[in-house]
Amino acid sequence: MALNKSSQTQLMGNLRDFPWWFLVLALIAIYFIFAITTKELYTDAFIFLQQGIILTIQVTLTAYAFSITLGLLTGLALVSKNPIIYNAATLYVQIMRGVPILVTMLYIAFAGVPAAIMAINGFGLFLAGVGILSPDNFLMALKNNSIDLLYRGILALAISYGAFSAEIFRAGIQSIGQGQMEAAQSLGMTYFQAMRLIILPQAIRRVLPPLGNDFIAMLKDSSLISALGIRDITQMGKLYSASSFQYLATYNIVAVLYLTMTILLSLIVRFMERKFKVGA
């Protein structure tokens, strides 16, 4: 019996709304789990690559914690009425948003940190010259190899994503009606009290989903630290494929590992979007 127009529309809607994409991803995951547990080629590659999983997660969590802190401070500066603070924050955001993350990472790792260490050494030399510190003070003892490339990569990710987080915080703060700030100040609150107690709690609730999306993006961009030779998932994949010549199996697993982590995080972000939906 032929379906009427209303039933056809409903059926098409159900077919459209069914998460076919998730079904495809689940089948891919099942296939690779089967391959890893039954095929020696994939098993060996996975055992080698899993050494980089923990490092990837550690780098992402550490860099993101610093970027959130930097982003919040910069976001507050972007809504400041002080022209110096506002323009300094805007300059930082524009530079970081205009320079590729990989370039920022290479610059900080091989130019920025060495230049900062030279400046610290020079300051130590100055303090020693005026008699404040001894000639062999700790500032002059700092060397370029004192700071591991891992920390330089984390710093670069944090500084880069701090600019994106700043824009998210700025938008969240400005989405709160100006009348709430005026009402809080009319009750005797200072600007900082009103921001801390009234504005920020509401703004943070609104920006949690986009901050979650930034976390997913950082997880993927953490692979850029492999350019510094740091043994994350991507770097371990390079090393294993170069030694075994099993490029297909190796990079299949690399891709699936990143895909698995990002899909899980995406589901969490979707849950957050529903839970913290404005007006819900």
Image (cartoon, helix red, strand yellow):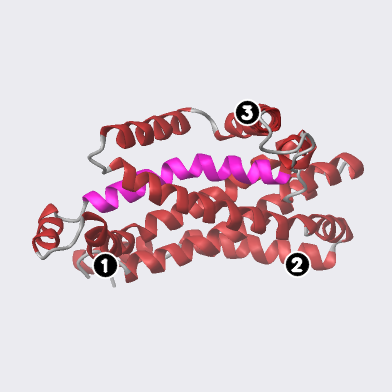
Note whether 246 is above or below 9 in the view shown.
above
Residues under labels 1 and 2: Cα distance?
Answer: 37 Å
Give the foreground label among 3 and 1: 3
Mark 1 neighbour density, 10 Å: few (under 14) some (14–19) many (20 or more): few
Could you say which is closer to the camera, residue 130 or residue 99? 130
Pointer 1 with pointer 2, Cβ within 8 A: no
Could you say which is closer to the camera, residue 49 or residue 94? 94
Report whether residue 248 is seen: no
x then y, percent, for residue 210: 38, 54
Total labels: the figure holds 3
Rendered residue at 66%/37% (across/down): 132
Q: Of helix, strand and loop, which one carries label 1?
A: helix
Give the foreground label among 3 and 2: 3
Q: Is residue 272 left or right of residue 176?
A: right
Residue to which mark 1 is pinned:
10
Segment colored magenta: 150-174
Q: Amino acid at mark 1?
A: Gln
| Image quadrant in which the N terminus is located | bottom left
Q: Of helix, strand and loop, which one carries label 2?
A: helix
Asked if residue 264 is among those painted magenta in the image, a careful observer would answer no
Give the foreground label among 1 and 2: 2
